[in-house]
Image (cartoon, helix red, strand yellow):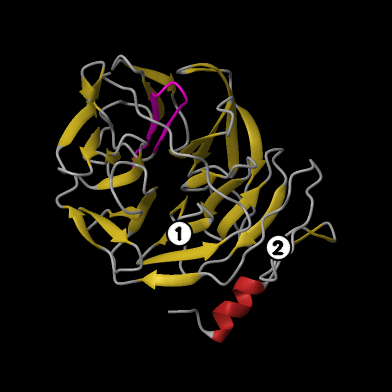
């Protein structure tokens, strides 16, 4: 189902920055950012694929060569305690229930579905048998607060965030932080005392890690020194804000092959170049929570947004899926 005329008008509206047009339009045109990267352009409207959910999150795409068979989109509905799967153009159906109130998901190249369970752990499901394996459940003897989102690095380890949303009080870990699960199964706290660390992603080369706080407008970036070893953070960019708001943060994010960042916010999906320059805003009828690339050409941006699931074709593509090597 396509948006109505008013919504479509909003979706087509490009964003002006300093009088220079940086946002793409449905014509497929693009512009150059100041740091030389090609700006993002859409190849059609934002389309609603399905609605009627409670709160959608954590989209991830399994390609045909992932070990799962045909291409499929997985996403979570947190209050429904369910992970859904959408195969091809069919309607989504329950895949895992109960899901431990899964939030962020990630399909790895070996055919496993990683899930941040807000009930306190990170697990991996075999996509064929649906059998779960616990990857990380505690740190220094205490359960995690409520794991939120994750990404696999080039070594095959996992970075995951652990904020306060849906966590017990007082917080089991006492701080809001993000962690690294190494290939030998050890968990280390990478950085703590952050304002609701949420979305997390790596640059195409794996040399930079991006962290999206939900209670700060300043998005963070770290240089990757080695697996689980990062520099001190610096401010990568500042999210654009609604009128009368000053410090609204982001939620989920994804990176394309050019290194552009797609950050969900209360305005829509804000797109930034690798240099931290604002490129454009992809407006969505509902406030988006998370995003991923998928489809046969990896050029479809899937967006989970409150009660709905949306998609839009872009001029850019998502990164190849890495392989998890924990426990090998």
Magenta residues, start to end: 150-165
Residue at the (29%, 37%) spot, across then down: 146
Q: Quadrant of the N terminus?
A: bottom left
Q: CA distance from mark 1 to mark 2?
A: 18 Å
Element type at marker 1?
strand
Q: Which residue is mark 2?
A: 24
Residue at the (70%, 50%) spot, across then down: 278
**In the image, residue 153 lies in the stretch drawn in magenta:** yes
Q: Which mark is residue 64?
A: none
Query: Which of 177 and 1 lies nearest the eye of the viewer?
Result: 1
Query: Which of 206 and 82 lies nearest the eye of the viewer?
Result: 206
Q: Quadrant of residue 36?
A: top right
Q: Position of residue 120 (x, y in %)?
A: 23, 35
189 to the left or right of 218: left
Q: Position of residue 57 (x, y in %)?
A: 36, 53
Q: Which residue is mark 1?
A: 303
């Amino acid at each position: 189902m396509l948006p109505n005329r008013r919504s479509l008008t909003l979706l087509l509206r490009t964003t002006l920055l300093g009088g220079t047009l940086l946002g793409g339009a449905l014509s497929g045109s693009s512009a150059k950012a100041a740091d030389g990267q090609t700006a993002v352009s859409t190849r059609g409207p934002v389309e609603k694929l399905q609605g009627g959910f409670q709160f959608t999150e954590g989209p991830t795409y399994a390609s045909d060569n992932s070990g799962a068979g045909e291409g499929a989109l997985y996403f979570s509905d947190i209050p429904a305690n369910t992970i859904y799967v959408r195969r091809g153009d069919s309607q989504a159906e329950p895949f895992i229930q109960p899901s431990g109130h899964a939030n962020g998901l990630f399909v790895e190249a070996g055919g496993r579905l990683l899930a941040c369970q807000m009930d306190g752990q990170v697990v991996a499901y075999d996509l064929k048998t649906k059998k779960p394996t616990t990857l990380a459940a505690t740190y220094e003897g205490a359960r995690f607060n409520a794991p939120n989102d994750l990404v696999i690095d080039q070594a095959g380890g996992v970075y995951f965030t652990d904020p306060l949303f849906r966590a017990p009080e007082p917080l089991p870990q006492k701080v809001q932080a993000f962690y690294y699960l190494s290939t030998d199964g050890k968990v280390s706290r990478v950085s703590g005392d952050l304002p609701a660390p949420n979305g997390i992603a790596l640059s195409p080369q794996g040399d930079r890690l991006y962290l999206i706080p939900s209670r700060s407008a300043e998005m963070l970036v770290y240089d990757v020194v080695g697996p689980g070893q990062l520099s001190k953070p610096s401010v990568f960019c500042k999210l654009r804000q609604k009128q009368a708001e000053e410090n609204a943060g982001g939620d989920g994010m994804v990176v394309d092959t050019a290194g552009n960042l797609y950050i969900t916010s209360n305005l829509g999906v804000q797109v930034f170049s690798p240099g931290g320059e604002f490129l454009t805003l992809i407006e969505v009828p509902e406030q988006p929570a998370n995003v991923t690339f998928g489809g046969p050409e990896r050029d479809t941006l899937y967006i989970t947004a409150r009660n709905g699931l949306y998609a839009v074709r872009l001029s850019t593509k998502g990164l190849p899926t890495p392989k998890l090597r924990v426990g090998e």
